Image (cartoon, rainbow, N blue to C red):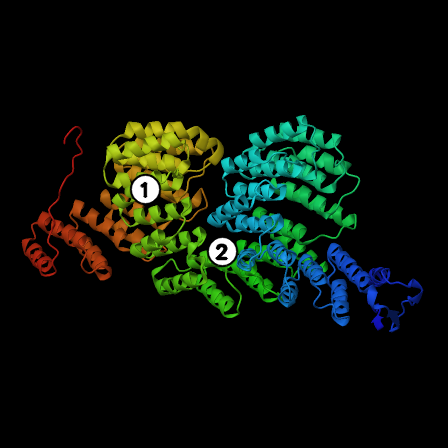
Amino acid sequence: MRIKIPFILVSHSSHKNCQFLSLLSLKFCTGLRTLGQVYALRPNNNKHVSLEPHDFDKICLSCSYLLSLSSKSKSPMAGAHGHAQIIKYGFIKNTFLLNNLLVMYSKCHCLGEARKVFDQIPDRNLVSWTSMITGTVQNGELVDGLFLFLEMKRGGFMANEFALGSVLMACSGLEALNFGFSLHGYALKIGIELNLFVGCALLDFYGKLRLISMAEHIFESITDPDVACWNALVACYVNNRVAEKAFMAVSFMHKQNLQLDQFTFLVMLKACSISRNFDSGRQVHALIIQSRVRKGLSVLNSLIDMYFKTGSSLWGMALFEKMEERDIISWNTVIAGLAQIGNKKEAVSAFKKMLLERIRPNHVTLSLLIRLCSSNGDLDLGFQIHGHAYHHTLADDSHIAVSLIHMYATFGIIEYAECVFKCMNFRSTNTWNEMISGYLMNQRGIQALRIFSKMYNSGMKPNEFTYSSVLGACSSHEYSKMGTQLQATIIKSGFDSYCFVGSSLIYSYSRFGSIDDALRVFYDMETLDLVCWGAMVSGLSRHGFFHEVLELLNQLREEGEKPDGSILSSALNASTNLASLDQSKGIHALVLKIGLERDVFVASATIDMYAKCGDISSSRLAFYSAEKTIVDNERDPVLYNAMIMACAHHGLAEEALQLFEKMEKVSLEPNNATFMAVISACAHLGLVREGCQYFDSIKSKYGSQPSAKNYGCLVDLLGRFGFLKEAKSVIESMPFEPWPEVWRCLLSGCRIHGNKELGEIAAEKILKIIPDDRATFLLLLNIYNREGNWEDAERLRTLMEERGLKKKPGHSRVETKGVV
């Protein structure tokens, strides 16, 4: 029997394609018995070659080689020609060729086609399963890779080192700790745990899950580790920020005369960048010069990046200038480094030089420059970079679009961000997320919810960042129902186990007062990070559940976690409100033990705590121990605000004003909270004129607008010292709708100075907003009693009894020591 094989036809569409496919076609023919039968390749030439049946094996090898070339060149089109030949000549049941075809599609990132081929293999062998599992994991479908592995096991196949290594990689990416432990046990059971490939995979698995001791144990059990195993151990140390051990491991490799490869140097340079260790980076540079990889572009690019990240930009630029060859990554590294140190001028200059050298920018280049414009407030330059994106046909790239949306949202021109978003042909999840964040940044919560709804209805799958962002728009009473619906959607989609989403849910429920729902979310989560703990502690503290805050802090410590500054600040606030000095001192001791006493928010909470517990000397001690660090590095007025307010509460108004003057001497600009503290201090000293001057300076000297609380402090100052008409005039002229507290300040002043007429006006304003406000009735009752207006007082007392507003008896609490 003789069969006829048509040759692959070559298209005229691309000269490079023609050469490549011609090469494949000629190679396909090298296995034929009679090469003289090969016809010249011409367009529309459909000649055939006669072939004997015993040439089938040679044809299979030729097809296999064709698919191998397609895999290496990542050319799915050429591979598809090979697929067509396999179908044409009846090799569709040949497991060997179908396995090669499966590998080709996987390496060309055509996972859907690979899966179709896999499903058509009639007799799947171990190679079929391993190839499919490996391809699935390498294409990022980690969950599918795990399910395929389980399906292979149920089919009776014993996994080899390649399948096991790939599935361990999937476990690393998914942080599937229990599944990974099971795979380790399975490797021990079948006796391949000492295989170098499996050993490297186990090292990577335990390293990514921060189980360094387990990774070290695995490494020690490997009899003769090669460079790949050493590299995996070093990468484990570096990824867990244990740079010292990484340096020691590489030093030992060097002493053992192991040939350090490119991956070793890349990992070590990353370690130097993370630890900001310039000296070690120089030593690694010396080793690179001695080695054979010194001319590798990837290593040189990493060296430049290391120098910038260790604060040695001059070294990085010098190395860049000496490079004989530069690719786009080299230029991007330099631009990113210059942007990182805030040198906008040099970054733009590097971009211009790159264009002059006829190197086409990519999405990374333009995204870096757009982000630089956002951080430096240069909108004009941002417009120019946007123009370059259009010029280089990159405006529709998702990375650039995300950067543009962020830039325009940062500058407050959300309409331009909407234009970029609407002009995109394809919108990724990140693009939708950035648009939602842009609306929230510009206080447009309803638009954020609308675009989320549009995203959801379009079939685009939200991720954890989408849900976390949109939950921020539901953090008010008017959107509480929307928040509940979102939680149902989150649970349905399986994102409720993500800490990032869980913390946002807790925060949202806490914001609109649903503490029970927040606690339910908190305790339903499988794993909790410090952000979740912090969100729950903050929510409880905000709504006055101070005992529960302290219980949660103890629970956190019992689980072996170290609280961060946010949690400790909330705990200090809770103990302050409970008036428990001993409890507060215990938390302060924990702060000192952890080493957070100079954290600006923790230090401020400590100052406030001691001041409210009556220990102003300890407040001073906490302030002065943190002052130098805060002034030199943080330049944040929060610490001074806390100390000024503490002095004001203790009647030390002169000391408070001296602290304010000290702020000005060290060029620390006060904020609205600072002026609240200063005006309160003036109220304690009776410095009405000075208080008014400080209030006026907010706008005249510092160019800011007084906040509603600043107006409230001014009204309190004026009312306390009898300037009642002036206080009423301030309330009526302020750019805010008067709220109950500001009228209550005026009412309190009327009580002190016996002004019945203004007092009744203030009380009427309050009772229109809060009809059954007990404090208002009591203040007005005191005014009547003071003036001897017994009839009005009796009438008011009767009205209070009818409304159930009887005065509650006061009580005091004294904390004693040594009493059982």
Residue 679 lies in what quarter of the image? top left
Label 1: which secondary element: helix
Residue at the image position 57 percent from the left and 47 percent from the top: 375
The x, y position of residue 45, in whole percent, is 88, 72
In the rendered structure, the answer to whether residue 326 lies left or right of residue 796 reads right
Q: Earlier in the sequence, mark 2 or mark 1?
A: 2
Cα separation, mark 2 vs mark 1, equals 28 Å
User: Which amino acid type is shown beneath numbered disc 1?
Assistant: Gln
Label 2: which secondary element: helix
**Residue under label 2:** 465
**Residue under label 1:** 555
Q: Nearer the viewer, residue 469 or 709?
A: 469
The x, y position of residue 46, in whole percent, is 87, 73
Say few, some or many: other residues with alpha carbon within 10 Å of mark 1 (under 14 / 14 to 19 / 20 or more): few
User: Which amino acid type is shown beneath numbered disc 2?
Assistant: Phe
In the rendered structure, the answer to whether residue 379 lies left or right of residue 575 reads right
In the rendered structure, the answer to whether residue 347 lies left or right of residue 519 reads right
The x, y position of residue 387, in whole percent, is 68, 58
Tag 2–tag 1 contact (CB < 8 Å): no
Q: Nearer the viewer, residue 214 or 98?
A: 98
Q: Where the C terminus falls, by quadrant?
A: top left
Q: Is residue 515 visible?
A: yes
Is 305 above or below relative to 460?
above
Residue 119 lies in what quarter of the image? bottom right
Q: Is residue 694 visible?
A: no
Disc number placed over residue 751 in the picture, else none: none
Question: Farthest residue in the right direction?
Answer: 36
Callout in the foreground (2, 1)? 1
Residue at the image position 33 percent from the left and 34 percent from the top: 607
Question: Farthest residue in the top direction?
Answer: 255
| Number of callouts | 2
The x, y position of residue 317, in whole percent, is 71, 36
